[in-house]
Amino acid sequence: MQRFSIKAMKVGYPCINRSMECRGNKTFRLDSYSEDRLIETVQNNLNCLEEMLKFNIEHDIYFFRITSDLIPFASHEVNDHDWQSHFRNEFQKIGNFIKDNHIRISMHPDQFIVLNSKKEDVVKRSIEELRYHADVLDLFGLDSTAKIQLHVGGVYGDKDKSKRRFVKRFQRLDEKIKRRLVIENDDTSYSLKDCLDIHHHSGVPVLFDNLHHRVNSSGEGLEKALEKSNNTWSEKDGIPMVDYSSQEANKKEGKHAETIDKNDFRDFIELSRPHDFDLMLEIKDKEKSALKAVDILSKDERFH
DNA sequence: TCACGTCAAGCAGAT
DNA sequence: ATCTGCTTGACGTGA
């Protein structure tokens, strides 16, 4: 499973391509919900997703995070449209493109999804939203190496108890969600060590985020952190995923860079060897930095 | 065409 | 108490 060439590393960016005209994350207000509006918007989002994936292949970008806005109001009660059947062919076509080109896919449900919440209705809605994410990846026909990355959630003044609540809720999830879920260390509450504890009790893989680790560290150096997080991924989970960003200069700790810092990136790659992973760049200018990263990896002597 | 108030959803930390 | 950030501002009304 280990790949020995840096050239095999897949690099990606999240959700939006700012160089392109189309927007694959279009949505609308709940007040203006209609079935026609939904169908029109989903069609637009799928078309644009396909265009972005084609752009990526042309530029050697083989990792992509699909927006949670792909299907607006997907898990909301207002949406009773059978979009799964309606767009079956489009999903299949894009899914085949993803598989034919060996593109790695992730999704990242947003902040409202809190599996360890103390409120039953928040948990219920969170699970519905996770089901939607799993549905999308299933409709594309992707295997369990396509992941849904989630933060652990709230602390509520008692982290140990809240960790145990996460484990319990995770264990009760449907297999179709469980096989795709991974947890990411965050910048305020759950450090890498916290995530590794949760892995120990649940088996959920840990996705390492370097910038969050800098801001909310549990003490491991980069190499140790990568070794530990990588070990939580099994064969069926595929190559581990890692989120990378550098700190924006003169801004609050943890603020994502506007554009890639080439030296920081080179250092990160050099220090990260020999650990193998696919790398998501959480950098504001998205595809522009991804292009620079691909360029650095293909040209820099140190990485060959 | 543009300004600007508001948007399904949670939580923590800053102000 | 209220605002801001989070992976990403952008929808939509009124002038």
Image (cartoon, coloured by chain):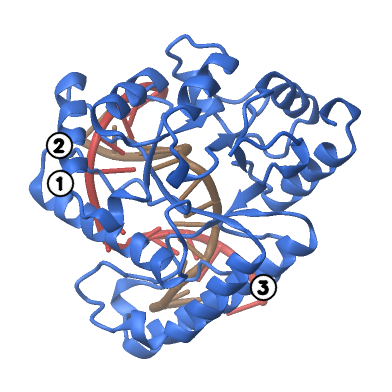
Chain colours: A blue, B red, C brown
Chain identifier of the residue bearing label 3 in the image: A
Q: Secondary structure at mark 3?
A: helix
Spatial CA distance of label 1 from label 2 is: 7 Å
Front-lying residue, A257 or A83: A83
Front-lying residue, A199 or A242: A199
Circle nearer the N terminus (2, 3): 3
Q: Which residue is mark 2?
A: A168
Quadrant of the image for the C terminus of chain A?
top right
Q: Secondary structure at mark 1?
A: helix
Are discs 1 and 2 both within one chain?
A: yes
Q: Which residue is mark 1?
A: A172
Q: Which residue is mark 3?
A: A51
Q: Residue at x 37, y 18 (%)?
A: A193
Front-lying residue, A113 or A303: A303
Residue A15 position by quadrant: bottom right
> On the rendered structure, is A106 left or right of A33?
right
Q: Is residue A50 above or below residue A196?
A: below
Q: Is the residue under label 3 in contact with that under label 1 (CB below 8 Å)?
A: no
Q: Amino acid at mark 1?
A: Arg
Q: Is the residue under label 2 in contact with that under label 1 (CB below 8 Å)?
A: yes
